[in-house]
Every structure is written in C-alpha cells, then in structure tokens.
Amino acid sequence: MKDQVFPHRHLLGIEGLTPIEINHLLDLSERYIAVNRSSKKTNESLKGRTIINLFFENSTRTRTSFELAALRLGANVINMQVETSSVAKGETLIDTAVTLNAMHPDVLAVRHSDSGAVKLLADKVNCGVVNGGDGSHEHPTQALLDALTIRRRKGRLSGLIVAICGDVLHSRVARSNFYLLLTMGARVRIIAPKTLIPSGVNRLGVEVFTDMSKGLKDADIVMMLRVQNERMKGSFIPSVREYFRFFGLDRQKLAQAKPDALIMHPGPMNRGTEIDSDVADDFERSAIREQVELGVAVRMAVLEVLAKNNMAFTSAGAGK
Ligand code: NCD
C-alpha cells in the first residue's frame, strides 16, 4: 500500500509539494534521529530491498548519507561512481537508467550536473527516483534537512525570517529552500551581488538585497551558500578578498541578525570566502554539524516512503 500522505513515486523536487506532505516527511524523519543516536542504528524496514546511488557529480555528504540511510534501514546498497568526464551526456544517461532498471532496484538516488537530468531519467525507469541534486535546479533532501534543523531549533518554520546569502544563481539548495520555506509560511530574503541573483527570482515571493547589513537585519536564520566556481562560466565575483569583505559572514555582519539567529551552510564550506571560521565553528550559533546529522534521518524517511510506494506502483502494474 502506498503512503497515504505522500503517495508519489519519486521525489524530484520540493516545487509542488503541499505543507501537509512536507510536514509528513519531516515528522517521519524525526523518528530516525533517535535511532541514529543509539548504539544499534538498525531498523529492518527495507530488508531485502535494493537502493542504487548513481552520482554523476562529486559528493561527500549527500552520497554518504544516502548510503548510510539505506544501510541503517537494512537495504542492499550499490554505489555507482560515474566518471563525469567519460560520460557522453543524454544517451549515456538514458542507457545507464535502462540498464540499472533491468536489475529491479527499488529506489535510485541520482545526482547530475544538468538541471532536469534526474527527471529525464525518472521517466525511463519503473522504480522510485530521488533527486540528490540536478544542476542548479533542485536538491529536495537538502531543503528537507534544512527545514528539520530549523524546526527543531526554532520550534516552527512559519513566520521566521530566513536570509539566504551568496551564490544564489547557481544554487539548487537555495531553489529548493525557496519552495519549501515559502510553502511553509516563512519569509525568505536573498542577499547576493547583482551578478549572482537569478533573474525573476522576486516573482517567487522572495525579497532581494545586495547589502548584507540590510538583508540580515532581524533575520532568524542566516543560511550561507558556497561560491560554486565549477558552475561559473566567466567571472561573477571580483576576487575572493573583495567577496568576503562584502558578502562573507563574520561576527560584525552577523550582529545585524537577531541575537539568537542560527547559522547554516549546506557544505562544503569555503572558509574565508563566504564564511569566517570563527562563526562557522561557533557551535552555540552554528547548526552546520546538525544539518549533516539530520541529513541521514531525512534520507531514511524519504527512502522508506519511496521504497514502500514503489512496491505498490509495481504490483499495481502502473510502472512503465
Ligand atoms: C550542495 C550541493 O551539492 O548542491 N552540497 C550538498 O549537497 N551538501 C551545495 C554545494 O555544493 O555548494
């Protein structure tokens, strides 16, 4: 039987999810935090099921946490490390999907450098697919773990002022967070140099700032983003020194936010570019380690729901 609240086959993005669906995934994740903190971190709910990690792009925490999440649920896990350089896009992606599909996995966790590639792949298989990040489009499990972190620290999402700062243009983390936070009733601000603001972003309902001291004023959450040099074709920032001076988070800029504002970063961090070590490592204020911890719980919940739904889709003959 499909999950009654989240009856979908895939999790490709946050866009289009309802507050009830988001809260449901967060509530399910919450149950796994205690499991992950106990000495015996196992639960057999996915025993005998197969999860494949298919990462066409580098990853440390996302891939590891999908793997750990699947192992802790008792599933069999295969990690496919695809050498991006040797992959001819498009055809290879579909070939790979069809090949893997023939081995009857329950869920594929996929990361790809092209926006839309994970959806393309999901259309070709008859198992569940979770997007582990596609280009600068979406990274839904990151937004869910960010939301879980905020909800646990602040008790709610609704009404909070969340300032998302830095390379918003190239960030799938920012995009998934916009959808999630706005759906849940938070106020979202972005703070970035003009060159790193996506065009038309204000139409989504976010407030746009180019000045840290104005954008951070009274913020409850300060979410810093990595400067994603690998996605930049051309020059978007003058120099690291200059960037840090205007957009890097340090104590002085943080003082504009609420006294108990929470500092977040999806990782990997460029210390001294977008964030100063002094604030990143202040574990009273910074939730960066907690984000990584909660990422495993969120991925356990998502894999469990998708694997369960996949069985229902497959037995109903609804698969392609
Ligand atoms: C992010 C990603 O890959 O989009 N990292 C992550 O998943 N923790 C952010 C980034 O790479 O800057």
Image (cartoon, helix red, strand yellow):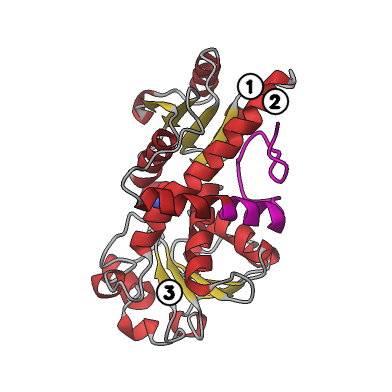
Q: Predominant secondary structure in magenta?
A: loop
Residue type, label 2: Phe
Question: Label 2 vs label 1: CA separation?
Answer: 9 Å
Residue type, label 3: Leu
Residue 125, placed above or below residue 300 = above
Residue 270, placed above or below residue 131 = below
Residue type, label 1: Asn
Report which quarter residue 272 is drawn in.
bottom left
The tag earlier along the polypeptide, 2 or 1, is 1
Query: Of the residues tagged 2 and 1, which is closer to the observer?
Result: 2
Nearest the viewer among 216 and 141 is 141
Report which quarter residue 204 is drawn in.
bottom right
Question: Label 3 vs label 1: CA separation?
Answer: 41 Å
Q: Is residue 219 magenta?
A: no
- The residue carrying mark 3 is 262
The circle on residue 126 is 1
The circle on residue 17 is none
Magenta residues, as a range? Answer: 1-27
- The residue carrying mark 2 is 313
Q: Residues within 10 Å of mark 2 (few under 14, many from 20)?
A: many
